[in-house]
Amino acid sequence: MKELLDRFIELERSISEEKGDFALFALFLREDAGDKWDLILAAPWIEEDRKSALSEITKRIQATFETEELTQLSRVVLVDLANPAVEAVNRAVRIQHGQAEVKDSNFFGLQIKHAYIISSERVDQQVPA
């Protein structure tokens, strides 16, 4: 998982340099998801056009990871910046372009067995021009 995590950190850094900071970029392993991780994302630029953002993020993930590695990813979840759970994670963990490991927690009303939070930082909700 270490190598995969390092590549997610680089992916997050690359996208944030191009598009703007993430309020949340995290990998969650749900209690009921076997060994498949959810990629959880929130950012002001995602709010502008969610469909386009999801398409671009998905393409970047596919270009970064091998097919075998992609099987470890269950889904990509775009979360509204206004979701109180985003603010709660931002208060609990403050990190940018790194990794904070969290185990046995509840996020977004889901029991999370394991999480790697790569970026969690309150960001201005204004979308840059």
Image: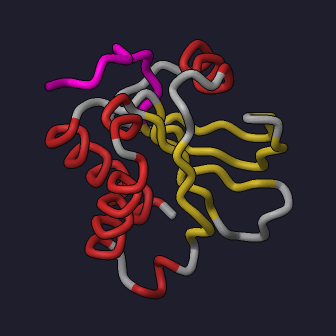
Q: How many numbered tags mark residues here?
A: 0
Above or below for 31 versus 63 = above
Q: Position of residue 87 (x, y in %)?
A: 59, 17
Foreground pick, 112 / 126: 126
**Magenta region: which residues?**
119-129
Foreground pick, 39 / 124: 124
Q: Position of residue 105 (x, y in %)?
A: 79, 35
The kind of secondary structure the magenta stretch mainly shows is loop
Q: Is residue 68 left or right of residue 129?
A: right
Q: Position of residue 32 (x, y in %)?
A: 85, 61
Above or below for 83 versus 2 = above
Q: Is residue 29 left or right of residue 109?
A: left
Residue 95 figure quarter = top left
User: Which residue ends up furthest to the bottom in the rendered image?
Assistant: 67
Give me the residue at 66% from left, 19% from top.
84
What quarter of the picture does the C terminus occupy?
top left
Above or below for 117 versus 81 = below
Q: Is residue 119 left or right of residue 109?
A: left
Give me the residue at 59% from left, 25% from top.
86
Give me the residue at 47% from left, 36% from top.
42
Residue 101 figure quarter = top right
| Colour setup of the view | secondary structure
